[in-house]
Amino acid sequence: MSDWKSAFEEWQEFLNQVEDARYEIDGLYATTWYRGQEEHAWPLLPTLLRSNVGNDARHDSEAETVRAAKTDLRDLLDEKTHLKKELTRLYAQGNAARAAATSDAYSQSTQAVAVAKRRVTAETQKAMKANQLAAGERELFAEFAYRAAAGARESSWRVLAQARHHGVPTRLLDWTESLHIALFFALRTYTASLEAEWRRRSEKVPHFFVPEGVTEPCVWILNPKGAGARSTGRPGIRDFEREGSYDYFDNLLQDETWPFEMPVPIYPPLRSPRIDAQRGSFTVHGYNFAPVEEQYSRGILRRISLSPPAAVFGVRYLRNFVALDDFAVFRDLDTLGSGIALYTSPWGSG
């Protein structure tokens, strides 16, 4: 049976793993981003891409072209392998005349394979770029921009960040420079269960227990500058709003000429009390809709899971020693009011 002492030891082990991961991604003395998730098995996908409904169908015709190119390549590789075996056999038999003819055929086959490989690469890239938009993406942005009365001259990146801020599905994925903020989100399920029981018991030292039915939380750790170098060829975090070189509306929604396949780390286009409190930043997904962890190597991105005892200790640590509650993270009057009602009055939050 775990207790607070053993939970503390597992918490320390989690912190050691975080430090090791930062070292492994060259983030120990550089900018490091974190993302907390309540379930370690959840893919790193922005809200817009978490449902594949409509997205798969958009790429069916392009995918069929890629499959045909790959089939042709496999056939050519089989033929090349056969010719190589035949050539070896003819040389062994000393049949120079037939070996010479087969050698010519083998050279032609090698050239054909090279051409087929280039075709597969080209068709794959074409398929990825052919439909850069996710299903409904243009409609979601237009609806929000219209109803939020966003001006025509307002940066489309700012409008996109505002839409994300207010719950509209976008291709932006939230990250934070603070491990504490990442843990706050990773431990939400644990926090709700533990604090309800701790308030009910009203003990001086909270009762240690692991809630039933909770999932395994985790924290992702990213080297954003390394990710920037990998995705754009330029080390660092991009500021697309100030750069003016790539516009969300022009390059994605309108022309579909977005040049980046992989997620790009960007500074937040919108500053708000909530983003500042969360020390937030984003990655913006490119035309490859695969999860972030499938696109970046372990040298750039790592995942660290929390054991149940470590998660329980983490909840107590964040509340008692970091004073991290909903209002500290979301910075709005609703969370302030509910927090006051919950912790300072006998009436609860109902």
Image: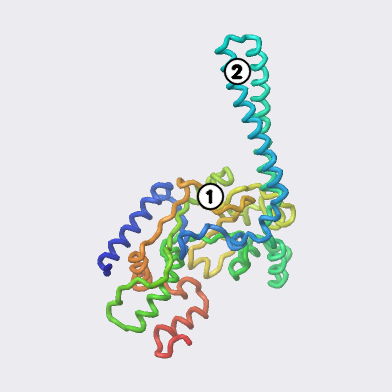
Q: Of circles 2 and 1, which is in front?
A: 2
Residue 154 location in percent, x, y?
Answer: 69, 63
Few, some or many C-alpha atoms within 10 Å of disc 1 (few <14, some 14-19, many ≥20)?
few
Residue 233 location in percent, x, y?
Answer: 57, 43
245 w.r.t. 344: above or below? above
Q: Quadrant of the N terminus?
A: bottom left
Q: Is residue 327 left or right of residue 66?
A: left
Q: Which mark is residue 260?
A: none
Q: Is residue 301 left or right of residue 103?
A: left
Which residue is identified by label 1? 294
What residue occupies the far left of the structure in this picture?
5
335 w.r.t. 106: above or below? below
Which residue is identified by label 2? 87
- Residue at image x 36%, y 65%? 308
- Residue at image x 52%, y 76%? 332
Q: Which of marks 1 and 2 precedes in the sequence? A: 2
Q: In which quarter of the view is residue 343 placed?
A: bottom left
Residue 182 location in percent, x, y?
Answer: 45, 63
Using the numbered discs, state the Cα–Cα distance from disc 2 to disc 1 in whole angstroms: 41 Å
